[in-house]
Image: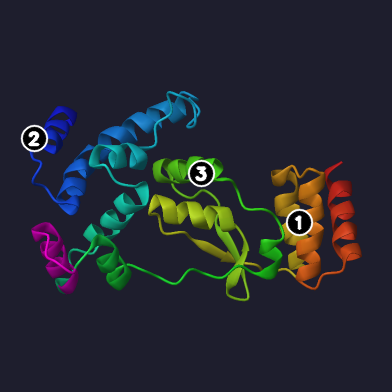
Amino acid sequence: MMWVVKNQLTDRRNLNPFQSIELALKSKPIFAARAKAHQQAGVPLMSGEGIEAGKEVAKLAGVKSDTIRKVERILEKSGITEVAAAIDALRRGEAGISINSVYQQYCGKKRMEQHPFCTIFPQATDEELAIMAESIRCIGLQEAITTYESKILDGKNRYIACDMAGVEPHYDEYQGDDPLQFVISKNLHRSHLNGSQYADVLKKSKDCGIPNQTIEDATAKQEELTE
């Protein structure tokens, strides 16, 4: 299968970008199986031997990983008459229609907002998000995203990784009466904050209208609970 895909992409130079991506996607199950085997063997994703299926497919097609994700979303909606017509137009390479325009029209969605408390802690790095996304592709989202007042309270990195992986996240609504303490308890041990990062947490807390003393007290409370 890999040999066929590579040779078709090399020999059929008349393929337009959408056709090339469709062909390259036939190799994704192979890359996904290899990635899962590497993950189970403990091979780090960012090592020289690490495999991320989406990126490998993108290399074959000669496009960015984000474009692969968009085409996958478009193809998932091929059962809708209007989308099927757009897919046919993309395959024909019609002028004035692009992968991005079709994606925005039929697949784009408004991202869920983050609660101010959620923004206090730093976002994961691109490498960390890539690792998280690949894990979600292989085994699914293992921990629900917590919402509060119709916004993300905890799990913004998982939310982004789900979008990268093309996986629909699931949610749990926060039921307690101290959402700030909840966010701190969920993130303080994960973030391993250094001095500058902690200073940034205090600044963001102040920007959110939270007094420094409040978050310092909450931090101290969490440290007592984890001793």
Label 1 vs 3, first from the N-terminus: 3
Residue 167 located within the stretch drawn in magenta: no
Q: Which residue is mark 1?
A: 184
Residue 116, compared with residue 160, is above or below; it is below
Q: CA distance from mark 3 to mark 2?
A: 35 Å
Residue 37 image offset from top left, x and y in percent: 39, 27
Look at the numbered disc 2 and give the secondary structure of its residue. helix
Looking at the image, what colour scheme do you see? rainbow
Kind of residue sitting beneath label 1:
Ile
Q: Which residue is mark 2?
A: 11
* Numbered badge on residue 160: none
Residue drawn at 15 percent across, 61 percent down: 90
Kind of residue sitting beneath label 3:
Met
Mark 3 vs mark 2, foreground winner is: 2
Q: Which residues are magenta?
A: 82-96
Residue 83 located within the stretch drawn in magenta: yes
Q: Which residue is mark 3?
A: 132
Label 3 vs 2, first from the N-terminus: 2
Question: Residue 182 is drawn in which quadrant?
Answer: bottom right
**Where, quadrant-wise, is the N terminus in this rendering?**
top left
Look at the numbered disc 3 and give the secondary structure of its residue. helix
Find out whether the residues at labels 2 and 1 contact each other: C-beta distance under 8 Å. Answer: no
Label 2 vs 1, first from the N-terminus: 2
